[in-house]
Amino acid sequence: MSLDTVKHAADTPDTGQPWAELGLKEDEYARIREILGRRPTGAELAMYSVMWSEHCSYKSSKVHLRQFGEKVPENDAMLVGIGENAGVVDVGQGYAVTFKVESHNHPSYIEPYQGAATGIGGIVRDILAMGARPVAVVDPLRFGAADHPDTRRVLPGVVAGIGGYGNCLGLPNIGGEVVFDPCYQGNPLVNAGCIGVMKHEDIHLAQASGLGNKVILYGARTGGDGIGGVSVLASETFDETGPAKRPAVQVGDPFQEKLLIECTLEIFREKLVAGIQDLGGAGLSCATSELASAGSGGMRVDLDTVPLRDATLSPEEILMSESQERMCAIVEPEKVGRFLEICEKWDVIATVIGEVTEGERLEIFWHGEQIVDVPPRTVAHEGPVYERPYARPEWQDALQADDAGKLPRPESSAELREQVLKLVASPNQASKAWITDQYDRFVQGNTVLAMPEDAGMVRIDEKTNLGVAMATDGNGRYAKLDPYAGAQLALAESYRNVAASGARPLAISNCLNFGSPEDPDVMWQFAEATRGLADGCFALGTPVTGGNVSLYNQTGDVAIHPTPVVAVLGVIDDVTRRTPIAFAEEGQLLYLLGDTREEFGGSAWSQVVHDHLGGLPPAVDLDREKLLGEILIAASRDGMIDAAHDLSDGGLIQAVVESCLRGGKGARLIVPDGLDAFTFLFSESAGRAVVSVPRSEELRFTDMCGARGLPATRIGVVDGEEVELQGEFSLPLGELSTAHEGTIPALLV
Amino acid sequence: MTTRIGVVTFPGTLDDRDSLRAVRLAGAEPVSLWHRDKDLKQVDAVVLAGGFSYGDYLRAGAISRFSPVMETVIDQARAGLPVLGICNGFQILTESHLLPGAMLRNNHLHFICRDQKLRVENAETAWTADYETGQEISVPLKNIDGRYVADERVLDELEAEGRVAFRYLDGNPNGSLRDIAGITNAEGNVVGLMPHPEHAVEPLIGTGRTDGLAFFTSVIKKLVTA
């Protein structure tokens, strides 16, 4: 086939083009022709099609995401907001932290190992591109039913991919989640988060400015992997009869990424770049168009200079390739020599592929012939925006009317005991050590807390002990019952987890996993969840720094539960004051903080015991969450508590069992006045935590709670080798640990 | 004069900064060494840190063993320079034939990261003198290729000469023969082990123990008194 140059395109307006196969709608194709005043060349069509895909353009979600920029709480910490590779917040002492969560859901279903591995690789490069040293990763994961045969295919591959790639990068994996639910069968959610640290003055942005500055592509050679992965994978719902799409998944090389990290950090230290961007979804199409549209001039790229793994690739394929471990930098001409030297030191291939030009066009050449001539903003930022129709689903009322409070409750002490054991052994509530032990949590030597703690925490300054914490949470069951409340509950839980570790919540990132935006029911869930999250962040004073949307998580007509995952970042001035979850000291007093009501809608108990989902999720009270957070942070700072565990899915008993097993100590519990044993153990009322208080601190602690108006109820004592509920049952730690720790290995080994 | 301890960075080394920190906390001067340099910068001892040098491609440690820095390390180790190989560093030492045996993939085929109990079997090497023989310590273990193997004759020889330096306790995590976690050469200056003492040098960080610090204080004492 002869080269489709700009001139050729202008001369042959009637040539048919495969816009539909590339995922573009008819009106989108018409708009491209209108922008260019002619038909696009093949290369231009490739660029527009990937950049205007749902994954890259956020065309269905944009109108709702705007709220995150509009409902911004007063917060001095924000240094860089939404729109860059990742947001940046001030954590004090001259340090800034950047963090983000992204999805790699569809690739991980098709090829679990590489899908998950390259998910880590992508998020780490996003963080790196901000100028930060990546310091930790987290992985919120969701799979189909734990005992489904396909979960045995997907989960071990995903976990091995995260470990195989992440461990090789030298980044501690400090948190995340593993959730099972049949709704994720065929649509597992593989989200990955990363935290990076830098000094304020080291923040780098993705922009190409300065006439004559060079465009340098460095890292791995470009190959045929992941071509069209973005548009094909993220924008089409899986069709069970469709062709295998394996070649669309990228293949990762963590060793190359590790070199890229060290090389890039050395380049930053010497202040050699004017702008930088990682190559992720949509590869060079994305990097060149985003860099050029953020800069002051245009850009010229000679595509035939790109180092290739496969010499037969066409220019369109090179533009669309999502080969991993590549970065693109804008470098002043006099610094190019030193830049290339550092790349050579780290055995990283680096090539000048173009330069910043006068004018406002992105021009790409192939052996001297022009194949792209576009206004870069029209590619990167001015894609289509859809006001998708949405409506509250017809079934929503019936679902909410199906109250979980009406489910039969245990009628005897023996039945209560049996249900506790069943709960802590259920796949969602069981220990995930078999999974998390496959991740390196120690590397870099700064890990203060890691799973199964409430939040992961790393030290960022060895002299002052400044640290940051992060938790990720999401509960698709709650969100299904009420997406507005569900998103706020995810936020509240993550906020609470960070506060329980002793850190002060500062800002959030999110990963919004939903079904098809073309379904008005799903779009309503999305609209409600984003509205809830934006309102919640405003109320808690934690701005949204950025995030990611993953749509089309559905097979046929069946969508996943709406699953907004929220990552809260917190700061702690002195990591030695951190609060672990372990009940480790005999005789310490256990206090339940917050109010416990009969709230079982969407609860773990209703799922485990009755396989039920209905009613309303727990009530949200964000003022209460804030107060609870303040108490937990103050108590940690002033040494009033030795352990704290947030209460969420599984309720009080789940938290107590986890804390006892972690500390190797039992607990004697008493049902407080005004509650029945069942509600006490299994209610999932929000805004609660359980804390372990040294006897010497009891008065000071309860005085503080009393003065601030936070209900604090003494519910027992750390004691012995059993978890005992007085007058009801006792469970030896050995029996609990067998139940809690045996489930996942039994399903997966 | 302060003891200078070098830590080698190969492409793909991960725990070099951790090892430098451990050296500093133990009271010596940490010195970064680069894989392409034959010059050891006059250090008194060398640590080969953990990680995935060269991506563990071909075989863990197999490519690093041929790097310029290793030429000098191998020569000087034979002349008595104290060398500690941790995890990937241990793999490089076996590939270099400074220590016998080899590491295979864990018998359960998974990466494993956990706090691991060990018994110090030989407290007379350059890197273990601050321990007592028979002492039980706990340090993090994290690897996928950690199963120590050697033929029976070599294993018997190691046992007979007291060259098994560390043994796994409370469950063998990877199928290593005779529960071997670490070994020493006959002279006691070259020690390799799979677990990570450099991750157990500060309270609160990692496992919250400092059981690994004595590796580094041992070698400092030996060098000062030598």
Image (tube, coloured by chain):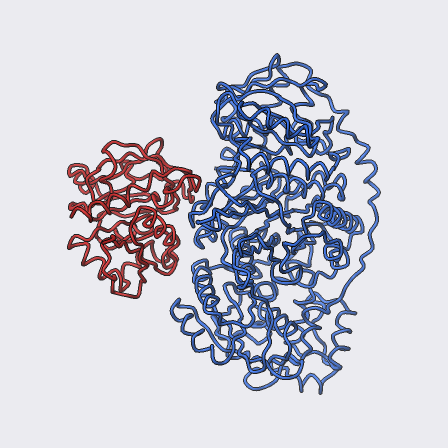
Q: Colour of chain B?
A: red
Q: Position of residue A332 (x, y in %)?
A: 52, 78
Does residue A327 appear left or right of residue B101 in this picture? right
- Observer able to see residue A238: no
Does residue A120 appear left or right of residue A541 in this picture? left
> A607 or A374, which is in the foreground?
A374
Name the residue furthest top.
Answer: A727
Image chain in blue: A
Q: Is residue B65 above or below residue A186?
A: below
- Observer able to see residue A152: yes
Q: Position of residue A211 (x, y in %)?
A: 58, 82
Please tell me which residue is depicted at 45% across the width and 69% down the height of the picture: A270
Please tell me which residue is depicted at 59% across the width and 72% down the height of the picture: A319
Number of numbered markers: 0
Image quadrant in which you'd find residue A86: bottom right
Q: Is residue B48 above or below residue A572?
A: below
Does residue A55 appear left or right of residue B149 in this picture? right
Q: Position of residue B9 (x, y in %)?
A: 34, 59
Q: Position of residue A168 (x, y in %)?
A: 43, 53
> A208 or A72, which is in the foreground?
A72
> A476 or A464, which is in the foreground?
A464
Q: Is residue A703 above or below residue B179?
A: above
Q: What quarter of the picture does the N terminus of chain A occupy?
A: bottom right
Does residue B27 appear left or right of residue A14 in this picture? left
Q: Is residue B60 above or below residue A7?
A: above
